Structures are given as structure tokens and as C-alpha cells.
Image (cartoon, grey):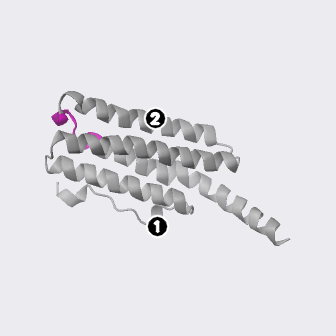
Amino acid sequence: MMQNDLKVEWDAGFSVDVAEIDTHQKKMFDLFNELIDLKQRKAESKAIANIITEINDYSKLYFTEEERMLRQREYPDRDIHARYHRRFIRNALSLRREITEDVNNLSLEAIVSLRDWLIEHILTNDAMYVPFLRIHRYVEDASRKQ
């Protein structure tokens, strides 16, 4: 497999129409691309461990902000949505455990699988709240104009 085949660049197709959340998505894509790059270059385990830690920490920040926004707007499926986030965090933590003994335990497939889970989540679960937020914004804007 070619090195760049595994990397995924963020584009507007992933946008949830909320600048802060889109920024978090972009950062997560960058982190995964960096992790894939490090793994392919057989970088030292400390560098790989640091990126995995950053993915863990950043995903918590990203998901917390997204959940807070959904709670503020009273999105009806926010609890289900949060459960998906917990699953991602558990899986990301397991990547960290896999490399505790030996960085070679971490497979490229495991990295790509977790990254693909995030992409699928953005394109399906996150996409479901976009119309809800647009309507919410429309109503807020209409109320302000009155």
C-alpha cells in the first residue's frame, strides 16, 4: 500500500456546519495522519506514544465540546451520541495499552480502523444532528429579528 493511500484529508464533505467542531475534526484528521506517518516510518515508540496520548486527550476535548453544544440545543439523541464517543475513547485507550509493552504490537490496521470509525461517525452520527442545528439556528435568528 502506498504511504499516502492511508492518509485522509479533511474536506467540506465532513463539515457539520459548526466552525469549532469542524476545527476539532480537522485536528483529529491531522493527528491520525501523523500517527500513520510515524508508524509507516517505524518511528521511535516515544513519538508514537505521544501522538496516541494526544489523540486520546484531544478526542475528549472535542467530544466534550460537541456534547455540550448538543445539550445546550437540547438535541434529542445526545445521550446515544455520547455513548458512541465513549466507545471511541475506549478504543483509543486500547491503542495506548497495545504499545505499552512493545510499539510493534500496534498495527497500521488498528490505527486505520480507529480513524475509519471516526470518519464513519462524522458522516453518519454527526450528520444526523446537522439539520437539527440548522433549524435551531434559523429559529434563533428569526427570534432576534423580531
Q: Is residue 26 left or right of residue 136?
A: left
Disc with the residue nearer the chain's start (1 vs 2): 1
Instruction: Find disc 1 in the rendering and name its residue.
Output: 12
Instruction: Find disc 2 in the rendering and name its residue.
Output: 87
Q: Is residue 102 left or right of residue 117?
A: left
**Label 1 crowding class (10 Å Cα cut-off): few <14, some 14-19, many 20+?**
few
How far separated are the C-alphas under marks 1 and 2?
25 Å
Please identify the quadrant where the N terminus is shown. Answer: bottom left
Q: Is residue 98 left or right of residue 23?
A: left
129 in magenta: no
User: Looking at the picture, how far across and down is residue 69, in whole percent?
Assistant: 62, 50
- Residue 145 showing in the rendered view: yes
- Residue 75 showing in the rendered view: no
Please identify the quadrant where the C terminus is shown. Answer: bottom right
Secondary element under disc 1, as helix, strand or loop, is helix
Type of amino acid under label 2: Arg
**Label 2 crowding class (10 Å Cα cut-off): few <14, some 14-19, many 20+?**
few
- Tally the numbered discs: 2
- Magenta stretch bounds: 103-111
Q: Residue at x 56, y 49 (%)?
A: 66
